Amino acid sequence: MRIATWNVNSLKARLSRVEQWLTETSPDIVCLQETKLSDDAFPAMAFSTLGYEAVHHGEGRWNGVAILSRLGISDVVDGFAAGIEPDTEARLLTASCGGIRVATVYVPNGRELGHPMYHHKLTWLARLRQHLEATADSTTDVVVCGDFNVAPDDRDVWDATACHGGTHVSEAERSALGSLMEWGLVDVLRLRHQEPGLFSWWDYRAGNFHRHLGMRIDLLLASAPLAQRLSWVLIDRNARKGKLPSDHAPVVAEFS
C-alpha cells in the first residue's frame, strides 16, 4: 500500500509532470493540494486512464484538493463535517479508500504573526481535529496528509534563527499541530528519519532549492495501527527538479 501527498501548485500547469510521476512511482492513494481548479475543470479522465478514481473539491483560481485512488473511493466529505463551522475555501477533502480513511488538507498560510489569517489558521487546525473526531476512528487505519504550512520543529527548517519570528514555526502553530496529532496521528517520516534538513518546500526565489534553503511543511500523518505497518517513507526531491516544477516535493510512504 503506497500513499503519497503532493502540493502541485496548479494542476493545470503541472498535469503532464503529475501523470509522468504517477506512472513512474505507482502510488495506490494520492492526495493533491493547491490544484487551483474548479470541479468542472478537474482532469478526472486523465487519471482514470492511469487507473485512478478521483474526487476533487475545488473553487477555481485558488486552493483545491483531490484524492486519487486505485482502491476505490467512498464516503466522501467536502470540507468540514456537518455541525462544524464551514470553510469558505476548498482546503479539505475526506474519503475512504480500500479500508483507509483518507483526508487531504491544505492548511491556510497565516500570512504573518498576529494577522487575522494567522488566527484563522489556528482555529482551522482546531476544526480539523473536530472533523476527524466526527468522521474517523483513530483505532483504525487513517491518514491525514497534505500541506500543513507548519514546520513541526527546528529540524524542519534550514535556519531556525532566521525563521523564528515568522509564520510556520511559531509556538502557537506548532502547538495547534500537536493538538491535532494528539487525536492519534503519527508523523511517519520521523519514524524512519530523525536527521535535520529533510525539506519538502523551497521558495522559487533566489535559487533556494539548489542552496538547500527549505522547510518540511508537507506531512503524512497516520493513525497508530497504520503507522505500525510502515515499510519506508521518503521525500521525492527529484520531482522538484526540471522544467516548471511545483515548489513542493511529494512525500511517499509504503505500508505493509
Image (cartoon, rainbow, N blue to C red):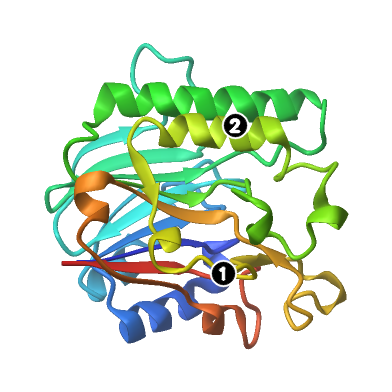
Few, some or many C-alpha atoms within 10 Å of disc 2 (few <14, some 14-19, many ≥20)? few
- Most distant residue in the top direction: 83
Q: In which quadrant is the C terminus drawn? A: bottom left
At x 14% / y 55%, what residue is drawn? Answer: 72
- Labels 2 & 1 near each other (Cβ < 8 A): no
The location of residue 55, given as percent across then percent down, is 31, 49
The location of residue 66, given as percent across then percent down, is 39, 52
Residue behind mark 2: 175
At x 38% / y 69%, what residue is drawn? Answer: 252
* Quadrant in the rendering for residue 192: bottom left
* Quadrant in the rendering for residue 26: bottom left
Few, some or many C-alpha atoms within 10 Å of disc 1 (few <14, some 14-19, many ≥20)? few
The location of residue 193, given as percent across then percent down, is 46, 68
Does residue 13 appear left or right of residue 39 in this picture? right
Q: Label 1 sits on what residue type?
A: Glu
Q: Label 2 sits on what residue type?
A: Ser
Find numbered disc 1 in the image and state the secondary structure of the residue it sits on: loop
Find numbered disc 2 in the image and state the secondary structure of the residue it sits on: helix
Q: Is residue 154 above or below residue 203?
A: above
Residue behind mark 1: 195
* Quadrant in the rendering for residue 223: top left
Q: Mark on residue 178?
A: none
User: Can the viewer see residue 88 in this picture?
Assistant: no
Name the mark nearer the viewer: 2 or 1. 1
At x 70% / y 45%, what residue is drawn? Answer: 168
Q: Nearer the viewer, residue 32 or 160?
A: 160
Q: Nearer the viewer, residue 54 or 94?
A: 94
Q: Is residue 81 above or below residue 163?
A: above
Distance of mark 2 from mark 1, alpha carbons?
21 Å
Which mark is first along the chain, 1 or 2?
2
